[in-house]
Amino acid sequence: MSSAYDMIPVLSCENIDKEYVTERTWNGKTKTIFKAVENISLYINEGETLGIVGESGSGKSTIGDILGNLKSQTRGKVFYRGQDVAEMDEESFRKYRKNVQFIFQDPKGSMNPYYSVLEIIGEPLKMLGITDDEEVIERKVLGIMDKVGLSKSVLNKRPDSLSGGQCQRVAIARALVVRPEIIICDEPVSALDVSVQAQILNLLKDLQEEMDIAYLFISHDIGVVNYISNRIVVMNKGHIVEMGRANVVFANPKDEYTRKLVECSFVN
Ligand SMILES: Nc1ncnc2c1ncn2[C@@H]1O[C@H](COP(=O)(O)OP(=O)(O)O)[C@@H](O)[C@H]1O
Ligand SMILES: [Mg+2]
C-alpha cells in the first residue's frame, strides 16, 4: 500500500543554480556572472498545486523553465518521477516531455498567427508523435475544447480574432490535449482583465479536479497564488525565502519579505 511517505513527486529539483554571463572580455572570456537563482530545491506532488510567488526578476520563470527543460541549469538536478532528467534514456525523456507542459502569460505571442485553433491545439499531438491522423486529432481537439469552455465555432478561427480569455483557453487546451501530469503555468492570468482572471483560475481548478493534474503556478500576485495553491514558495532575488502550506504562509508569514508581499496585496 502506498502512503504519503513513499510518494514520488511528479517533478522536483535539488540545489539548482542558474548563472548568466552578463559581460565578456574582448577575447570572449567570462567577465561578469549574474546569479539568477541559487540553491533551489522543491517538489510538486501528483495532483497538487505548488505556487511560486515573488516580484519581477526574482527568478520564478527561470525555475519553471529549468524544471520544464526550456533552459539548462548551471548546477543541480531536475527529477521527473524521481529520475534525473539529465540521465534519462530516450523513452523516459519522451515521457517527461509529454507529461510536463507549459502555459504562459502571453498566449497569442506563443501561437503561430497563421494557424487555426484546430492546428494550434492539435500541434503537440503531432510534435510528440502521438498521432498524425487528422480525424483523431480533430476529435481530440474538440473534446478538449469542450473541457476548457471553447465553443466549436472557433475551431477554424485564427488567434487574432479571439479575445485574451479565449486565447488563454486555447493555450490551456493545447497543454492538456496530450494528457500531461503537470502544467507549468507562468503568469497565466497576469495579462487578463480581473473578471477573466477569475474565470481562468476557476477553470484551472476544475480541470485539476477532473483530470488529477498538478500545477507549478508562477505569479507575482500573492493573492492569485494563494487562491490556487496548496503549498507556496516565496522567492526574493533568486533565493527561496519561505515555503509552506499556502493558507499558513499567507495568514502568518515568517519572513519579512513575505510579510511585505502580503501587505501589498491588500492595498491593491
Ligand atoms: N538570458 C539572460 N541573461 C541575463 N540575465 C537574465 C537572462 N534571463 C533572465 N535573466 C535575469 O535573471 C533574473 C531572473 O529572471 P526571471 O526568472 O525571468 O524572473 P521572474 O520570472 O521572477 O520575473 C532577472 O534578474 C533577469 O533579468
Ligand atoms: Mg517571469
Image: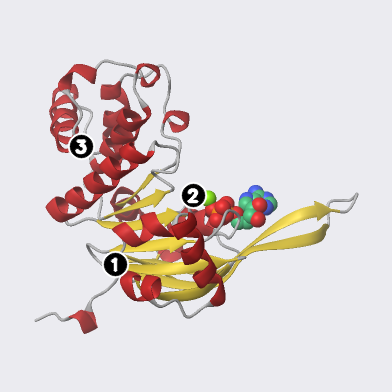
Numbered badge on residue 70:
2
The numbered mark, 1 or 2, whose residue comes first in the sequence reads 2
Mark 1 or mark 2, which is nearer to you? 1
User: The residue under label 3 is which amino acid type?
Assistant: Val
Could you tell me which residue is drawn at 13 percent across and 33 percent down? 143
Is there a contact, CB below 8 Å, between mark 3 and mark 2? no
Q: Position of residue 22 (x, y in %)?
A: 76, 54
Rendered-image quadrant of the N terminus: bottom left
Instruction: Determine crowd level at label 3: few under 14, some 14-19, many 20+ residues with C-alpha closer than 10 A.
Output: many
What is the tally of numbered marks visible in this picture?
Answer: 3
Q: In which quarter of the image is residue 237?
A: bottom right
In the displayed structure, does residue 35 sit left or right of residue 141?
right
Is residue 59 at all visible to an observer of this figure? Answer: yes
Q: Does the residue labelled 1 lie within 8 Å of ligand 1?
A: no
In this view, the residue in front, 77 or 215, is: 215
Q: What residue type is disc 1 on?
A: Asn
Q: Name the residue under label 3.
A: 148
Q: Which comes before the other along the chain, label 1 or label 3?
A: 3
Residue placed furthest toward the right: 26
Residue receiving disc 1: 230
Relative to 187, residue 155 above or below: above
